[in-house]
Amino acid sequence: MTEIEFNEMVKSHSGELKRHAMKFTNDVEDANDLVQDTLFKAIRYREKYQDGTNLKGWLFTIMRNTFINNYRHNTKTNTLIIKREEISSENLTFSATVNQAVGGFILTDINNALKQLPEHYRDPFVRYFEGYKYHEIAEDLEMPIGTVKTRIHMAREMLKKHLKTYSKENMNNING
């Protein structure tokens, strides 16, 4: 595939990427920036793309990683640059330290719960989470689409049990 063909294929996914970016950012301008960064990285690292693999899934992975890296960078920057007027008792209640600690515990718990899933449930679930469609997962894993849907559903149910602590009811009880 030529460079121009690759660029056109990448560009053809920009609408789907924008919709996916809105799920991350909840802001039109931030979503546009995230899509632009994703397209730039995809074209820049074209040689890392392997022909025959799912281009949309590859782009969604780049987007997710870009969002996470930007979030980490912005969190560090925002915690270092705080004006004196911005520090109030309300801001201190929800300080970055507490939020990062809680977020770290939650992320650790999620990763541990994912590791406890049997591989035949984890693989389809992770691929679905990364943006692959059921039929793409079925093709990649060489299994019927119904099996893929069932395994994703079962993985969700297992994760709900492992992460019950973070259910809305439990979080409302903790927060008072």
Image (tube, rainbow, N blue to C red):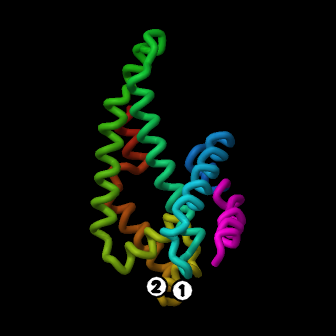
Relative to 142, 20 lies left or right: right
Rate crowding at label 1 as few (under 14), some (14 to 19) or many (20 or more) other CA atoms within 10 Å. Answer: few
Classify 68 as above or below 160: above
Which residue is drawn at the image coordinates 49% and 81% (left, top)? Answer: 148
Q: Which residue is mark 2?
A: 141
Q: Give the magenta part as a residue range.
A: 1-18
Classify 36 as above or below 14: above
Q: Secondary structure at mark 1?
A: helix
Q: For the residue marked with disc 2, what is the amino acid? A: Leu
The overriding secondary structure of the stretch rendered in magenta is helix
Q: Secondary structure at mark 2?
A: helix
Query: For residue 90: magenta?
Result: no
Q: What is the C-alpha distance between the residues marked 1 and 2?
A: 6 Å
Classify 8 as above or below 71: below
* Front-most of residues 115 and 167: 115
Relative to 127, 24 lies left or right: right
Badge 1 vs badge 2, beta-carbon distance below 8 Å: yes
* Front-most of residues 39 and 150: 39
Rate crowding at label 2 as few (under 14), some (14 to 19) or many (20 or more) other CA atoms within 10 Å. Answer: some
The image position of residue 2, as x and y in percent, is: 65, 75
Q: For the residue marked with disc 1, what is the amino acid? A: Glu
Classify 74 as above or below 106: above
The quarter of the image holding the C terminus is top left
Which residue is drawn at the image coordinates 42% and 14% (left, top)? Answer: 87
- Find residue 139 and name its label: 1
The image position of residue 28, as x and y in percent, is: 68, 42
Number of callouts in the render? 2
The image position of residue 10, as x and y in percent, is: 65, 65
The quarter of the image holding the N terminus is bottom right
Q: Residue 133: name its quadrant.
A: bottom right
